[in-house]
Image (tube, helix red, strand yellow):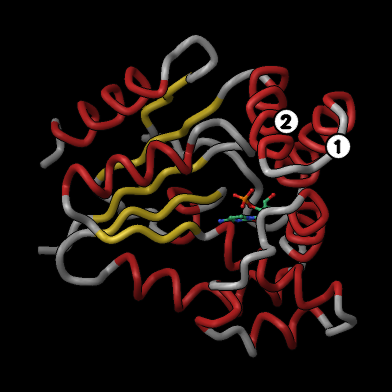
Amino acid sequence: MRFTIAIDGPAAAGKGTISKGVSAHFGFAHLDTGLLYRAVGRRTMDGEGAEAAALALTPEDLDRGDLRTAHVAQAASKVAVIPEVRAALVDFQRNFARRDGGAVLDGRDIGTVICPEAEVKLYVTATPEVRAERRYLELSGKGSDISREQVLADVKERDARDMERAQAPLIPAKDAVLVDTSDLSIEDALATAIAAVQTKL
Ligand code: C5P
């Protein structure tokens, strides 16, 4: 059975939690496509060219433990504006989406560019302040000493770069179901997403 669920939205809107919950609920495979851009960004921090890094990406790159930092997030959004980087990552994502047994992909351009034919598209969002607070708690819980103000500034900078880039900007697909998680608990956000998928199965 081929069935693709595309989940897009800005940083820290709840995409990761919803994607993991939806994939576990339906028994589908899950790909966090942000990790691909983070892995490319991480390689450029060591001096490698962005396109070369994207072409050379291996599964081991995605397993690195240091991809979730604020620095890597910024590096990821910088390499993500480069068309050659995006092009190098397309086939891997589309092949994943078409695997037998169902797939959930989350990112910024899944419903618009990578899988415009996805059976279900969700656009998960929340206010910048709510998203920054969540990311702040996540980062400080991991021992980072980054400030709230810095996290909010980073979130807004990354939003602007992701939404204003020429290639594959972050924008809801026309047929996406909008899920605003600003005032939703994790449980309610997940239940909303699962209900949206259920109607298309
Ligand atoms: O989702 P995550 O925060 O890990 O993504 C890191 C960065 O990778 C994003 O800010 C965005 O610039 C880029 N990205 C993208 N397209 C995707 C997924 C992530 O441009 N499908």
Q: Mark 2 — residue?
A: 136
Which residue: 15% across, 38% down?
Answer: 200
Question: Would the CB of label 1 be found within 8 Å of ligand 1?
Answer: no
Quadrant for the C terminus, please. top left
Quadrant for the N terminus, please. bottom left
Q: For this view, does 36 lie left or right of residue 8?
A: right
Q: Disc 1 vs disc 2: Cβ atoms closer than 8 Å? A: yes
> Identity of the amino acid at label 1?
Ile
Q: Mark 1 — residue?
A: 146
SS label for mark 2: helix
Which residue: 72% across, 83% down?
Answer: 53
Q: Which of 87 and 78 lies nearest the eye of the viewer?
A: 78
SS label for mark 1: loop
Which residue: 60% across, 35% down?
Answer: 12
Cα separation, mark 1 vs mark 2, equals: 8 Å
Q: Residue furthest front?
A: 143
Q: For this view, does 149 lie left or right of residue 175?
A: right
Which residue: 68% across, 43% down?
Answer: 142
Q: Which of 4 and 144 lies nearest the eye of the viewer?
A: 144
